[in-house]
Image (cartoon, grey):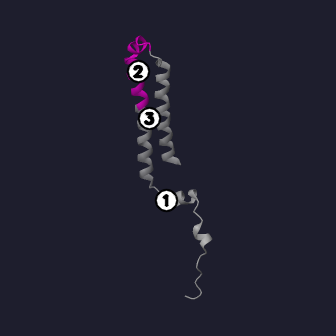
């Protein structure tokens, strides 16, 4: 007991690195969790893309008649961007 080293205040006062804490906190996921989570995001991306474009085509005449500053092109870009974001989350969940 007499030989136990007491850490100095300088060592105790130094904060731990954020990346080190995140690696420790992350833990490991089982393969099934990754497959289900990644598949859910990829499925949601596909659903978002196809149903969004379907809704947009059904409302095409109304959108064009409204003379909105957000025409068909910007709305399609919004749907595609949302779907790509969800697909990226699915790929990230599966592999990264």
Q: Is residue 66 magenta?
A: yes
The image quadrant of residue 4 is bottom right
Between marks 1 and 3 in the image, the one whose residue lies nearer the viewer: 1
Q: Is residue 67 above or below residue 26?
A: above
Between marks 1 and 2 in the image, the one whose residue lies nearer the viewer: 1
Instruction: Tell me which segment is drawn in magenta.
Output: 48-67
Q: Is residue 64 left or right of residue 21?
A: left
**Which disc is residue 45 wearing?**
3
Q: Are marks 1 and 3 in contact (CB under 8 Å)?
A: no
Between marks 2 and 3 in the image, the one whose residue lies nearer the viewer: 2
Q: Is residue 58 above or below residue 79?
A: above
Give the residue at x 41% y 37%.
43
Packing grade of label 2 (10 A; few <14, some 14-19, many >=20) is some
**In terms of secondary structure, what is the magenta stretch mainly?**
helix
Q: Are marks 2 and 3 in contact (CB under 8 Å)?
A: no
Give whichever of 69, 94 is nearer the camera.
Answer: 69
Give the residue at x 45% y 38%.
42
**Which disc is residue 25 wearing?**
1
Give whichever of 4, 61 is nearer the camera.
Answer: 4
First in residue order: circle 1 vs circle 2: 1
Q: Which SS class for mark 3?
A: helix
Give the residue at x 48% y 46%.
93
**Residue indicated by mark 2:** 56
Give whichever of 5, 28 is nearer the camera.
Answer: 5
Distance (Cα) linking label 2 and label 3:
16 Å
Q: Find residue 35 and report its horizontal and vertical position in percent.
A: 44, 47
First in residue order: circle 1 vs circle 3: 1
Q: Find residue 44 and report its horizontal and vertical position in percent.
A: 41, 36
Seen as rendered, the residue at the extreme top is 65
Q: Is residue 43 magenta?
A: no
**Which quarter shows the N terminus?**
bottom right
């Amino acid at each position: 007991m007499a030989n136990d080293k007491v850490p100095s205040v300088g060592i105790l006062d130094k904060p731990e690195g954020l990346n080190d804490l995140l690696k420790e906190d992350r833990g490991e996921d089982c393969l099934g969790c990754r497959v289900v989570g990644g598949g859910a995001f990829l499925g949601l991306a596909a659903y978002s893309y196809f149903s969004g474009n379907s809704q947009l085509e059904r409302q095409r005449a109304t959108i064009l008649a409204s003379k909105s500053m957000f025409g068909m092109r910007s709305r399609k870009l919004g749907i595609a961007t949302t779907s790509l974001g969800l697909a990226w989350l699915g790929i990230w969940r599966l592999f990264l």
